[in-house]
Image (cartoon, helix red, strand yellow):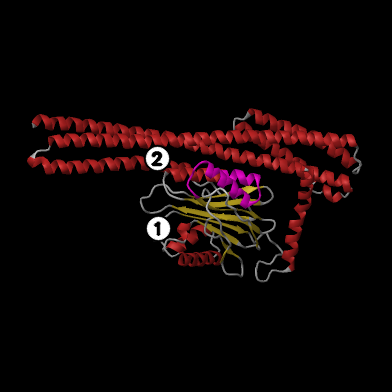
Amino acid sequence: MVRMKGEVGRFFSIGVVVLAVTIGLLAVGGRTVRRFVASAFTGADQIRVTRALASDALAEQLDAETGIRGYAATRDPLFLEPYAGVRPKLDATLRRLAASLKESGMPAERDDALSAAATSSEWFARVAAPIIATHGRIAKPIQLQGKKLVDAFRADIDRINDGLSQREQSVSGQTAQAIDRINALIAASIGITLAIAVLLLVLAARASVHRERDRLIAAKVEREVAALRAAYAAEKRIADTLQDAFAQRPLPTLPTLRFSATYVPATEEARIGGDWYDALELPGKRVLFAIGDVTGHGIDAAVTMNRARHSLISSALLDADPASVLQRVNRDLLGQDAPMVTAVAGFADARTYEFVYSTAGHPPPVLLEPGRPARLLDCGSLPMGAIADVQYQTYRVQTVPGAMLVLYTDGAIEHSRNVLEGEAALLRAATDAMTEDAAESATFIHNAIFRGRPVGDDVAILTIGFATDLAEGLTVSADQATSTFGARINRTAQAPSRAADGRRRIAA
C-alpha cells in the first residue's frame, strides 16, 4: 500500500511538471503567434494604402486625359479647368506610390511606379502641352503618340495592381498558417492535459481501497477540474491573441464626414466573436462603410470575419455597386466553406449627400435627418455564404447636410428577446444622440440602450454623418429643403458626369 501511494505520488508530480511545462510553452507560443498575426495584418493595411494610391494615380491621369481630349474636340477652355492642378497632384501621388511600394518590399512594382511617373511626364510634355499651345489643333502623330503613352501608363499601373494582389494572397496565406499554428497549440494543450488526467485516474483507481476510496474520488474530481481550467486558460490566451490582432482599425478623418464606432464584447465568458465594422476613404470625397456579423463564436468565426472584411474591401475597390460587392464576397465565402455572414456595405458621397448600400441578411440601417424622426431603411436578401445564386439589391438614399446613418449588429436589438422593442429602443437612442449632438454617437447610442446592463452577445455600432458646418447656403431641414440645395446637388452630380462619360469613351 505504501509502495502504491508512493507510485501515485511520483506520477502525480511528473504530471504536474509536464502540465506546467506545457502551459509555459503555450504562453511563449501564444506571444509568438500574436507577433506573427500582427505582422500579417500590418502588411495587409500597407497593401490597402498602396492599392488606393494606385487607384488615385489612374483616376488623376484619366482626369487629365479627359480634359485634354475634351479641349481638343471642342476647344472649350472649360475642359482645361481641372487640368491645371492635376499634374502636380499626379506627380505627388506617384511619388507616394513609389515610396509605399519600396516600404512594402516590392522593388519591381516600385520600378513600375517610377516608369509610370516618367511616362506621365512625357505625356504632359509631348502631348498635352502641344495641344494647349496650338489651341486644340492636334496632329494625328500626336494623337497616336498620346495613345501609346497612355497605354504604357495603364500597363504600369496594372502590373502594380497584379503585384499587390500577389502580395495580398501571400499575406492571407501567412494568416492561415498562423491560424493553423493556433489550432495545433490548442489541440496539443488539450491532448496533453487529457493524457495526464487519464494517467492519474488510472493510478488512482489502482490505489483506491476501502477508507481511501472517497478521498481518491474527490481527488479525481479535483484533477479533472484542474485539467479543464488549464485547457480553458490555454484557449483563452489564444483567443486574446486573436482579439488583439483583429482589433478595429482607426476610422477616416474627413471634414465633410463624421464617424463614430464602438465594439462591446459580451459580458458572459464567451469565446471571441465575429462582429466587425470598417470604413475606408476613397477618391472623390467618397467613403466605403461596412458592418457585419459572423454566425457562431470562436476562432473559426474570427478567421471568417477577417476573410470577409478583406474580401469586401478588395471588391469595393474594383466595383462601385454595393450589390455586386456582396455577390463577390458571397462567392469567396462559398469557395472557402465558411460560416454564414450578415453584412451591410455601401458608400457615402460627401458631394451629393447620398448613401448607397446593400444588405445581406443584416438588420436594417437607421437614418436620421434634421427635422424628421429616425426611420429604418430598406433591407433584405440572405446572408453571405448561404447559397450561390442569391441576388442582392442596391438601395440609394438621397439626404441632406446633418443627416446621420446608424449601422449595428443584431446584439443591439435582440437583447430583450423582442426585436420590435429592441428596434424602438434603438430609434429612441439614435434620436437622442442627434438631439444632444453627441461627439461619440455610437457610444452614446450603446449606453442609452443598455444603461449599464450586462448583455449576452457582442455589439458593434458604426455611425456616418454628413457635416453641416461646410454646407454653406444650404438648408439643413429635410422637410423644408429649398431649391438652393437641389441646385447645389445637381451641379455637384453633373460635374463628374462629364468626366465619367469621357472615361467611358477612353476605355472603349
Disc 2 from disc 1: Cα separation:
23 Å
Kind of residue at badge 2: Ile
Q: Residue at x 72, y 64 (%)?
A: 485
Q: Position of residue 37 (x, y in %)?
A: 48, 37
- Which secondary structure dominates the residues rendered in magenta? helix
Image quadrant holding the C terminus, namely top right
Q: What element does badge 2 sit on? A: helix
Q: Residue at x 65, y 28 (%)?
A: 108
Q: Residue at x 55, y 36 (%)?
A: 43
For disc 2, the neighbor class at 10 Å (few under 14, some 14 to 19, many from 20) is: many
> In the rendered view, would you say 175 is above or below 499?
above
Q: Residue at x 16, y 43 (%)?
A: 217
Quadrant housing residue 23:
top left
Q: Position of residue 383 (x, y in %)?
A: 52, 52
Q: Which residues are magenta?
A: 311-340
Mark on residue 455?
A: 1
Q: Earlier in the sequence, mark 2 or mark 1?
A: 2
Task: Give yes or no for residue 86 being in the magenta stretch.
Answer: no
Check whether the beta carbons of the residues at disc 2 and disc 1 lie within 8 A of each other: no
Q: Is residue 186 left or right of residue 323?
A: left
Kind of residue at badge 1: Val
> In the rendered view, would you say 4 is above or below 412?
above
Residue 120 seen: no
Residue with the mark numbered 2:
238
**Depth check: 252 or 377 in front?**
377
Q: What element does badge 1 sit on? A: loop
Q: Position of residue 198 (x, y in %)?
A: 23, 36
Q: Position of residue 68 (x, y in %)?
A: 83, 43
Residue 49 seen: yes
For disc 1, the neighbor class at 10 Å (few under 14, some 14 to 19, many from 20) is: some
**Depth check: 468 or 497 in front?**
497
